[in-house]
Image (spheres, helix red, strand yellow):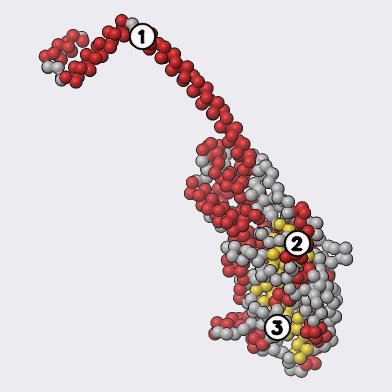
């Protein structure tokens, strides 16, 4: 096929009337085609996407530049930084001959730039602390997080209903534990039997263990106040650039339950609070989930169902979700089918399984007469990718070998001192990093128990006083009786009877005579 035909097809496919983002420049027969850019329409960014490729092929830099371009267009970004290597987006990049050469080939100017950034955390990393209360999850979602069966879900529903009726806020894990202990035994059990039902010891025990497991993975830091408001992800700076929110997750790679909990909460909260935007207009927020294979590898059935539902519905809220992983096969087919933009960096075929996977990956892309896709995937250089996006009409564009644009910010991490400075200058960090532990179910139950125990203690004290007085009175009476003639007579008779028993049984005749005398 001729280069002219290729150029004509790509130019026609990637010519958009509305706003767009330049991803890079096309490559044909290992040569850059100047004068044409591979672009992504801003109106289809919320149709979700995939960024895939082997380690070291340039995925992270593609994500970084993509996020920069969105910020420049006024679209906010939430970056889930699993590896901890993207925080440098807050600082301008340094001049580099290789970057200049690349951008000259693409035909796009390159200017070192810094971008407005919020560092965020759900663990012990530095940044704005993201929290949520247990009440905000609701009984259904909270049960899914704990992976409970129907009986155990019913027990959780009782806990939530009881707390709603008694005006007891459920804020953190210790609140849930306290209420569950109260309702599964003693006075609390009697209290709920009539109006709510009972909680079996087996269900209570399982839920307690699940709470402990969640707590050990960091849930005690995530659940609580002040609860994060998702609208704060939509900040803009004075120049109109949208904030890039970098959620630092480097220390929770081995804690999948905490991460899946956060994902469930965040997506549900965004879907419920963001206004309906429809298919038209610019997106409000784009979420990049780096190292997504870690999520799906450990994902519970509940998380998978939730993600599937969210992917289908959340785009109507002006939100796009981009999964970044090593191979498209890491993403479940039902979710992969919902992703409109696909950016595929190189894959390496070291084994027979690798070659088989590459053929499957190639089949996920639109067929093309210009490339042997399965072969080209293994030959792509660093910072090169196969790209297909949705046009403004929602039609997939032809697959194109693309040299990707380089980031304009620092391609390295922030130093600890720079991180501290970034957090210190954050307006919302001052709001959310203040620890709040207001009166909730745990404290209210303790007060109730203490109030119930006080009358009991008073009764015990009164009873003790009465018993002591009675004992004293009886003692005096015994003293008075002991000296009387009646007492002496009784004493003699008792003594005689005891001696008779000890010495031996009386004869039959004597027993008979005694029996007769009794009548």
- Please tell me whether mark 2 sits on a helix, a strand or a loop: helix
Q: Nearer the viewer, residue 211 or 518?
A: 211
Image quadrant occupied by the C terminus:
top left
Instruction: Say above or below: 331 vs 147.
Output: below
Instruction: Say above or below: 163 vs 430.
Output: above
Q: Position of residue 159 (x, y in %)?
A: 59, 45
* Mark 1 vs 2, N-terminal side: 2
Residue 114: mark: none
Instruction: Say above or below: 52 vs 474.
Output: below
Task: Confirm whether residue 106 shows in the render.
Answer: no
Q: Residue furthest top?
A: 485
Badge 2 crowding class, 10 Å Cα cut-off, few under 14, some 14 to 19, many 20 or more, is some
Task: Confirm whether residue 432 shows in the render.
Answer: yes
Q: Nearer the viewer, residue 463 or 153?
A: 463
Q: Position of residue 275 (x, y in %)?
A: 78, 58
Q: Which residue is mark 3?
A: 382
Residue 420: mark: 2
> Which residue lies at the image location 70% right of the left edge and 57% below the top edge?
130
> Which residue lies at the image location 71% right of the left edge and 69% below the top edge?
288
- Which quadrant of the view contains residue 61? bottom right
Q: Which residue is mark 1?
A: 481
């Amino acid at each position: 096929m001729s280069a002219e035909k290729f150029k004509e097809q790509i130019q026609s496919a990637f010519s958009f009337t509305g706003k767009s983002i330049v991803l890079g420049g096309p490559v044909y027969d290992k040569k850059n085609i100047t004068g044409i850019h591979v672009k992504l329409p801003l109106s289809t960014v919320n149709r979700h996407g995939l960024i895939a490729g082997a380690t070291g092929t340039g995925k992270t830099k593609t994500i970084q530049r993509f996020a920069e371009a969105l910020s420049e267009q006024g679209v906010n970004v939430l970056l889930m930084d699993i590896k901890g290597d993207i925080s440098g987006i807050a600082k301008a990049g340094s001049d580099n001959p290789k970057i200049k050469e690349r951008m000259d080939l693409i035909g796009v100017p390159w200017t070192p730039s810094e971008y407005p950034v919020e560092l965020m955390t759900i663990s012990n990393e530095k940044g704005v602390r993201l929290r949520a209360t247990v009440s905000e999850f609701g009984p259904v979602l909270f049960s899914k997080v704990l992976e409970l069966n129907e009986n155990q879900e019913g027990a959780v529903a009782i806990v939530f209903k009881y707390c709603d009726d008694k005006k007891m806020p459920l804020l953190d894990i210790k609140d849930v534990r306290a209420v569950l202990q109260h309702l599964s035994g003693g006075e609390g059990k009697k209290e709920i039997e009539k109006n709510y039902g009972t909680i079996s010891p087996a269900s209570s025990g399982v839920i307690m263990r699940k709470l402990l497991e969640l707590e050990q993975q960091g849930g005690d830091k995530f659940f609580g106040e002040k609860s994060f408001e998702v609208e704060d992800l939509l900040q803009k700076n004075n120049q109109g650039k949208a904030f890039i929110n970098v959620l630092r997750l480097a220390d929770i790679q081995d804690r999948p339950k905490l991460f899946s909990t956060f994902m469930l909460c965040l997506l549900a909260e965004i879907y419920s609070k963001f206004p309906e935007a429809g298919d038209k207009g610019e997106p409000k927020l784009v979420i990049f989930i780096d190292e997504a294979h870690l999520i799906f590898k450990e994902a519970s059935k509940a998380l998978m169902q939730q993600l599937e539902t969210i992917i289908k519905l959340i785009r109507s809220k002006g939100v796009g979700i981009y999964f970044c992983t090593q191979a498209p096969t890491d993403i479940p087919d039902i979710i992969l089918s919902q992703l409109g933009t696909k950016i595929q960096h190189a894959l390496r075929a070291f084994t027979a399984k690798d070659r088989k996977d590459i053929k499957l990956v190639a089949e996920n892309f639109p067929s093309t007469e210009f490339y042997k896709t399965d072969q080209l995937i293994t030959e792509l250089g660093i910072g090169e990718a196969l790209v297909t996006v949705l046009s403004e009409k929602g039609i997939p564009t032809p697959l194109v070998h693309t040299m990707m644009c380089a980031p304009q910010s620092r391609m390295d991490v922030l130093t600890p001192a720079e991180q501290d400075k970034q957090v210190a200058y954050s307006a919302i960090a001052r709001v959310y990093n203040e620890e709040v532990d207001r009166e909730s179910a745990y404290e209210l139950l303790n007060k109730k128990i203490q109030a119930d125990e006080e009358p009991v203690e008073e009764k015990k004290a009164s009873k003790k006083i009465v018993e002591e007085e009675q004992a004293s009175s009886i003692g005096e009476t015994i003293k008075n009786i002991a000296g009387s003639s009646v007492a002496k007579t009784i004493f003699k008779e008792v003594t005689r009877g005891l001696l008779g028993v000890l010495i031996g049984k009386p004869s039959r005749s004597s027993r008979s005579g005694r029996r007769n005398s009794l009548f």
